[in-house]
Amino acid sequence: MPHPGTKMKQSIIITGSAGGLGQAIVRALLDTFPDKLIVATDVSPAVFSLFKEHDGLIPLQMDVSNEQSTHAVRRQLEEKGFRVWALVNNAGISDFYAVSEKEKEVLDRIFAINTFGPVNMVRAFLPHLMETRGRVVQISSESVRLPGAFQAYSSSKIAMEALSVAMRNELALQRIKLSIIRPGAINTPLLDGLRNMKDSIGESVYQKYLLAFAEKAPKQIGKLCEPERVAAVVVKALSQQNPRFYYKVNNNWKLRLAELLPHRWRDYFMRKMLAKSAECRVPSAK
C-alpha cells in the first residue's frame, strides 16, 4: 500500500502486446492516457524489441497462464510505486482441429490462455483494482455467436465470457467496471492459422471434413477491419464514465442471422456445408 500522503501512480497493463492488435492497443493508450504508465506484456520476448524506447511505457515478459509470472509483474510495478488502474486482457491463441480427438494437453493450453488467463490477471491485480477503482477490458470474439465443428477457439471465448459475467458482478461490488469487446475479423497474423490450416491437418478420422472446412471457412471471414479500429473501442471502454457491458466491432451479418436459427438448424447447415464440400451424404444427427 502507498504511504499516506503520497500520490499514487497508476498504470494500464495490456497482455498479448506483441501481436498485431496488442501493438495497436498499446499505441492508442499511449496517446490517450499520457498520465499513466503503459505496461506492454507478452509471453514472447519480442515485446522488448517492439517497445524498447518510450518514456511512458515499459515492456515486460509475462505468461498469463502462470501465477508466478503474473505476480512477479505485480511486484515489479509495486517496487516502482505503481498500482494498476486497468487491465486489457488481449492475450490469446487460435487453432483449428477436431476437438473430439485432440490431446488433452492441446485443449488445456488454449483454455489456459484464452479462458483462464484473464481470470488469472484479475485475481493477481485485484488489490490494485480495488485501490484504484479500476477497469477491466476483455477481448473476446464474435465467433461466440456460432460455435461449430473444429473450433476450440470459440469455445474458449464462450467460457471466458461466462466467467467474465460472474466477475463483472463481483467486481461491481468493489466499484470496478468490466467490459467485453467482441471484434469480428481483424487484419492481423492471427488469421493465418485459418488460411494455412490445410498445411497442418495431418492424420485424422475427420480428415476429409477438416480439408473441406479449411477450404470453406476462409471464404466466410467477411470484411476485415484494421486493429486500430478495435483499439479505438478499447479506448472508449476505458474512457466512458459508464462503459457498456459489451462492445461489438465489425461483426459479420451472416453470423448475426445464423445466431437466430434454432440449434438443430445451425448444426444441420454446418454438416451440410462440410459434407457437400467433402462430397459426402449429410450425416443425420438422430
Image: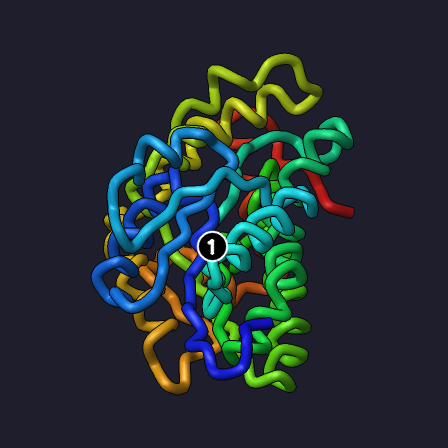
Q: Is residue 166 left or right of residue 197?
A: right
Where does the image place residue 228, in percent across and percent down from the top left?
24, 53
Q: Single out the residue that lies furthest toward the left.
A: 31
Identify which residue is drawn at 36% across, 43% down: 221
Q: Which residue is at a point 63% across and 39% down the rendered structure image?
A: 110
Q: Position of residue 104 (x, y in %)?
A: 77, 32
Q: Nearer the viewer, residue 199 or 268?
A: 199
Amino acid under disc 1: Ser
Packing grade of label 1 (10 A; few <14, some 14-19, many >=20) is: many
The answer to which of 221 and 257 lies nearer the viewer is: 221
Quadrant where the N terminus lies? bottom right
Is any atom of residue 223 visible in this view?
no
Near-viewer residue (165 or 69)? 69
Identify the image quadrant of residue 249.
bottom left
Q: Relative to 1, does residue 169 appear above or below in the rendering? A: below
Quadrant of residue 252 in the image? bottom left
Residue at image location 42% in from the left, 63% down from the top: 11
23 in relation to 204, above or below = below
The residue that label 1 is drawn on is 141
Above-or-below relation of 137 to 267: below
Name the secondary structure under disc 1.
loop
Q: Is residue 242 visible?
A: yes
Residue 32 quadrant: bottom left
| Residue at figure coordinates x 47%, y 56% from the top left | 80
